[in-house]
Amino acid sequence: MEMFRSHVLICGGTGCTSSRSDKIETKFNEVLKARGLADEIKVVRTGCFGLCEAGPIVIVYPEGAFYSHIKVEDVDEIVEEHLYKGRIVKRLLYKDSVEENVIKSINQVDFYSKQKRIALSHCGIINPEDITEYIAYNGYEALGKAITEMTPQQVIDTIKASGLRGRGGAGFPTGLKWQFTADAKGDQKYVVCNADEGDPGAFMDRSILEGDPHALVESMAIAGYAIGSDQGYVYIRAEYPIAVKRLQIAINQAKENGLLGKNIFGTDFSFDLEIRLGAGAFVCGEETALIASIEGERGMPRNKPPFPANKGLWQKPTLINNVETYANITRILLNGPEWFKQIGTEKSPGTKVFALGGKINNTGLVEIPMGTTLREVIYDIGGGIPNGKAFKAVQTGGPSGGCLTADHLDTPIEYETLVAIGSMMGSGGMIVMDEDTCMVDIARFFLDFTVDESCGKCTPCREGTKRMLELLEKITSGEGEPEDIDKLESLAETIKSASLCGLGQTAPNPVLSTLKYFRHEYEAHVYDKKCPSGACQALLQYFVTDKCIGCTKCARNCPVSCISGKVKELHVIDTEKCIKCGACQAACPVNAIIKK
């Protein structure tokens, strides 16, 4: 066994890779070799550490030095000072990892201290392309326990007893879904993983696949044993090249080590796993559309019932869960259902992974116990709103969710509580908005997305969402009429109740929630022809205040020559000619130009 005095862990998730963490890894190996330290120090490229705002991240153990925003040029200094001379490079440390010259461990950093990692427990710790590192962290023990010590029904009963609910959005009891599929009659059954993560700003499943692919492989094999299946498919969008590559490596390694394929662990249980690539259609996140896509058909939802548990892939009983749901399975089998139920709340046990983005200081991936409040996530973990701006709203559930206000910040995050206040858990996107965000424009943005992603099969979704988008575009362009607000609300309710699948049924949620909590903004757009947040370009007007020093820079930078005034005199903007490009405001040296 190789022994090293230090380990250099480098984030190899998509975010950090896009910021050249792969080049940082190469540089470390080159400099360590040149310094004669390659046999003493191991460089490991891991999955996502979660704190994407601080990337690229490098953590050096055993000291636990948490280096952030690392560049290729910083590598020489870290190797020379820290790894050779033993002096931590404090200027490169993450700002919150040092307190009164004491270096905190990663779990003491505010971003991590309130988190509880189950689904993400291996991400940022192991090399996802090395099966031996996964095995060192009890990898494949749960599979071994299931198929050598438990009956299929005992496995299902354990999952049922844990209270685990599907992490894909609706929160259906996982054990119950497994039971339905196990009880279904069929000469062939399938296990499917929905890794078609399409919500804007969501990257939970991608990060698990990039950082801990063997957890999915093992959990799907356990599911196969439980329901009586010997074949599984992972449906993943092709836009996730790193995840696809690492998952394929994990599948190959599992087969080479006898952990997939025939007679696993010397038993009569066999299970194989294949990847199916999707083209990136949001509607294929709906399970029947996903099934159609795997079958080679156009990804369009089917009527239910029958449900996939009875007639799914190729009309055979099929179990479908998403990546995060599967990532909990091995932990539950190893630690027991009671352990899992002690985390979270009575109705929503366990944890939930969220992709935290928008107007927030600590953007990234967080995993919190169910029942944690929105305030704790946004302020304690997320670090609050940048630039001293006021919090305005948070969107949970992506395009299918709703916008919640400051009045909801102390709401515990659970399936039922979020639905009760007009939003939903969704797959785990969480977008934070500040005082400069226009809620009407946010609703328009999400409707624009769902219009593009509608498969067009049912009329309410195909036509209704287009009409809603037209009304929102009319309102945000300053052409809205009083009756448009009522039309928008009525249309939203109709689409919600009449659409065929979850895409159409939830598409109106952003509109309905913003109408509920921010109706005054819609009314300002319609009646006053103003955008209170100053975000809707068509409703803006630029004015020169008495701060003007008459330098003429605004006039010289105006592309349509709509600013008049003499040197050292107050200038005036012709609002009729102004195209609202903002060039004058950007050019003004004394901030004398405002928009409202």
Image: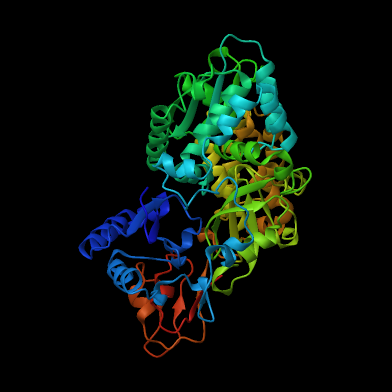
* Residue found at the far top of this picture: 187
Q: Is residue 241 or residue 103 the one in the foreground?
A: 103
Please state if 243 lies on the left or on the right of 30 as rendered.
Answer: right
Could you tell me which residue is drawn at 39 percent across and 33 percent down?
Answer: 253
Q: Is residue 324 or residue 591 the one in the foreground?
A: 324
Please state if 532 lies on the left or on the right of 40 as rendered.
Answer: right
Instruction: Decide: is 232 above or below 529.
Output: above
Q: Is residue 152 or residue 257 the one in the foreground?
A: 257
Q: Position of residue 110 (x, y in %)?
A: 59, 67
Classify residue 239 by image quadrant.
Answer: top left
Q: Position of residue 59 (x, y in %)?
A: 43, 62
Q: Is residue 342 or residue 525 the one in the foreground?
A: 342
Instruction: Decide: is 158 above or below 573.
Output: above
Whether residue 493 is visible here, answered yes or no, is: yes
Classify residue 11 by image quadrant.
Answer: bottom left
Instruction: Decide: is 517 above or below 215.
Output: below
* Residue found at the far left of this picture: 34
Whether residue 457 is visible here, answered yes or no, is: no
